[in-house]
Amino acid sequence: MNFSIEGIENVVDKLTQYASGDKIQRGLAMAGEVVRAHAVANCPVATGRLKGSIVSQVDGDSVAIGPTADYGIYVEFGTGSKGDKSVSHTSKRHWTYYSGGRFYTTSGQAPQPFLVPALKNNISEIIMKFREGYGV
């Protein structure tokens, strides 16, 4: 059985055009920048190091947004008994450490989310920017 579809070449051309890596990466870069900008705006500031370390990086067909400062996860999700219970490093009730000839006990720090809300609270803007960058 043989059949043909008139105009299939045009459809294939359009699909190839829409699947272009450059367009996807441009859309991801623009969407990632929205999340990054909101994360920076939401970020708690002590020294400014964490806020200044928030980056957006496109890699193929994905984009990663987050801080390069190693302690960013502890600010986002908290620590110890005060932290977000869904994160493994917050499972301890308290811990003790020794420094400068003294023992210190801490029960942790409360979460100060800046990255998750930057994504969750801006979905419409993120989609709009992706579409703009993609050319839709």
Image (cartoon, grey):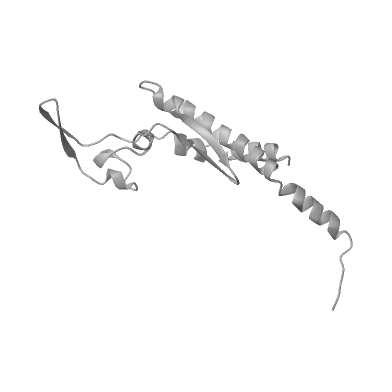
| Residue projecting furthest to the right | 6
Q: Quadrant of residue 75?
A: top left
Where 98 sits versus 85, above or below?
above
Q: Quadrant of residue 82?
A: top left
Q: Residue at x 57, y 39 (%)?
A: 58
Which of these two is toward me, 65 or 131? 65
* Quarter of the C terminus within the rendering: top right
Task: Tell whether 76 sits left or right of 89.
Answer: right
Q: Position of residue 120 (x, y in %)?
A: 50, 40
Q: Residue at x 31, y 48 (%)?
A: 88
Q: Residue at x 81, y 52 (%)?
A: 13
Q: Position of residue 19 (x, y in %)?
A: 71, 49
Q: Position of residue 42 (x, y in %)?
A: 45, 29
Q: Position of residue 2 (x, y in %)?
A: 86, 75
* Quarter of the N terminus within the rendering: bottom right
Task: Tell whether 73 sits left or right of 102.
Answer: right
Res 44 seen here: no
| Residue projecting furthest to the bottom | 1
